[in-house]
Image (cartoon, rainbow, N blue to C red):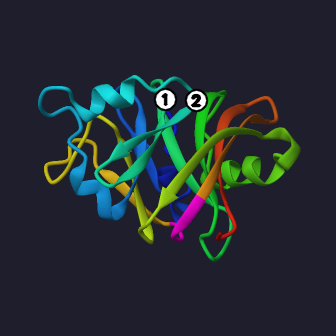
Amino acid sequence: MSDPEQADPEQALPSAVCDGGPHIVVPADLASGWRGAIGAGTDYSRACDVAEPVGIISVGRGCALVIGGSPPFTYWVSEEPGFSSGALVVPRSWASDFTASQLRTVCEQTPASGFRDLGLVFQNESSKCLLFAACDAGPEWVYGYSRFPLARGCYRVLFAEAHLGQSLEVSIIRLASMPAA
């Protein structure tokens, strides 16, 4: 397994990792409402019902973005200095260790025409989001979480599969800022 935070510490990316199951992005102000695998009819089971590659489920008064299936890692790559868009990158296969710089490069090199609109809208009413294993929940985190800035607003969810040479294949879930109504 590769860990871009270890391989490229000066350019570390927010990430999620776990032993199996989906990953989730939750606006920071809704994260305390996520119960993970605790209790009956769990939030985790709702997340597991999301088909790959991605879906939206309710959390409290808002929504969360679920990276379906069982990704080994998910990384957040901010695409703009103002944090008004970015991409979740899920490595699917790799021939050798990869770096955060390579994940950024594959995002930059994937043309807009390579993405398909999934017809989903992710609404973020916070200025930050948390990325973590959907089975987990605070305050007693098992796998932990990453926090990243994302401007308040609505985001179209776009999807592409891409590769960097022969050594790295990824799924890219781009959050594209929608103009205010």
Give above or below for 26 relative to 83.
above
* Circle 2 Cα neighbour tier, 10 Å, few/some/many (<14 / 14–19 / ≥20): some
- What residue lies at 31% left-to-right and 64% top-to-bottom? 29
Q: Nearer the viewer, residue 63 or 51?
A: 63
Q: Earlier in the sequence, mark 1 or mark 2?
A: 2
Is residue 67 highlighted in magenta? no
Question: Which residue type does callout 1 highlight?
Answer: Gly
| Residue 111 visible somewhere in the drawing | no
Quadrant the C terminus occupies: bottom right
Give above or below for 163 relative to 52.
below
Give above or below for 161 relative to 109.
above
Are dots 1 and 2 in contact, CB under 8 Å? yes
- The image shows residue 166 at horizontal and vertical percentages of 79, 29
* Circle 1 Cα neighbour tier, 10 Å, few/some/many (<14 / 14–19 / ≥20): many
Numbered badge on residue 174: none
Element at label 2: loop
Numbered badge on residue 53: 2
Q: Which residue is mark 1?
A: 68
| Residue 179 visible somewhere in the drawing | yes
How far apart marks 1 and 2 lie (CA) works out to: 5 Å
Q: Which residues are magenta?
A: 150-154
Figure quadrant of residue 23: top left
Question: Which residue type does callout 2 highlight?
Answer: Pro
Q: Nearer the viewer, residue 101 or 40?
A: 40
Say how many tags the image has.
2
